[in-house]
Image: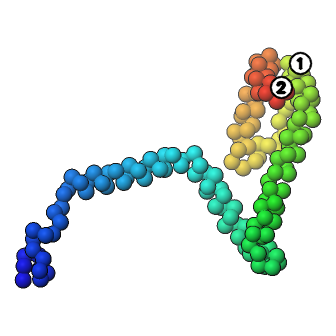
Amino acid sequence: MSDAGEPGVTRATLPAWDLTRILLAVVAIGGLIGASFWVLRPFLPAVIWATMIVVATWPALRVVQARLWGRRSLAVAVMTLGMLAVIAAPLIVAIVTIVDRADLIVAWTRSLATNPVPALPGWVEGVPLVGSRLAAEWQKLAATHPEDLVARVTPYLAGVVA
């Protein structure tokens, strides 16, 4: 029997451990993994959100697939159109409403210079978690001079009207 413990294998034929090579390989692989996450970091919230939607709607997809003769492609198309309707329809309505009311929004901001900020309804302060902070911010807003308020709001509305 030889030094290596196996018949026919000598210590000279076993691969030598090269600590430097192993360490550099581990560091390089770790660097590549880190760089991959750095490149993917802007997309991770969208991927997480999409995963949650897919997991939440999976049972509905299975039901739709069963009703569409077991065809997965038709079920995916129907679910995609349904999800677009659920997400896009309110967004489109909101955008159209803002565009239609742009002149009223501009008139409202111009009236801020002459009209005082109205009092906050009493129930707002009772809203859990945010009510007290919202009331405090509203009080600061109400104490702001009207010209300063118009100067703060105008830059944000310039993009809406344009």
Looking at the image, tell me whether mark 2 or mark 1 is earlier in sequence order: 1
Q: Is residue 36 above or below residue 83?
A: above
Give the numbered dot on residue 58: none
Q: Residue at x 72, y 49 (%)?
A: 128
| Quarter placement of the C terminus | top right
Spatial CA span between label 2 and label 1: 24 Å
Is 1 left or right of 140, judged from the image as shown? left
Q: Residues within 10 Å of mark 1 (few under 14, many from 20)?
A: few
Give residue 146's quadrant in the image: top right
Q: Residue at x 59, y 49 (%)?
A: 43
Residue 67 at x, y percent in the picture = 82, 78
Residue 136 at x, y percent in the picture = 72, 34
Is 82 left or right of 137, judged from the image as shown? right
Mark 2 — residue? Answer: 162
Residue 125 at x, y percent in the picture = 76, 42
Is 142 left or right of 10, judged from the image as shown? right
- Callout 1, which amino acid? Thr
- Callout 2, which amino acid? Ala
Q: Is residue 143 visible?
A: no
Q: Secondary structure at mark 2?
A: loop
Give residue 133's quadrant in the image: top right
Q: Residue at x 73, y 67 (%)?
A: 57
For marks 2 and 1, give the one nearer the viewer. 2
Mark 1 — residue? Answer: 114
Is 1 left or right of 111, judged from the image as shown? left
Q: Is residue 77 above or below residue 155?
A: below
Q: Residue at x 75, y 37 (%)?
A: 135
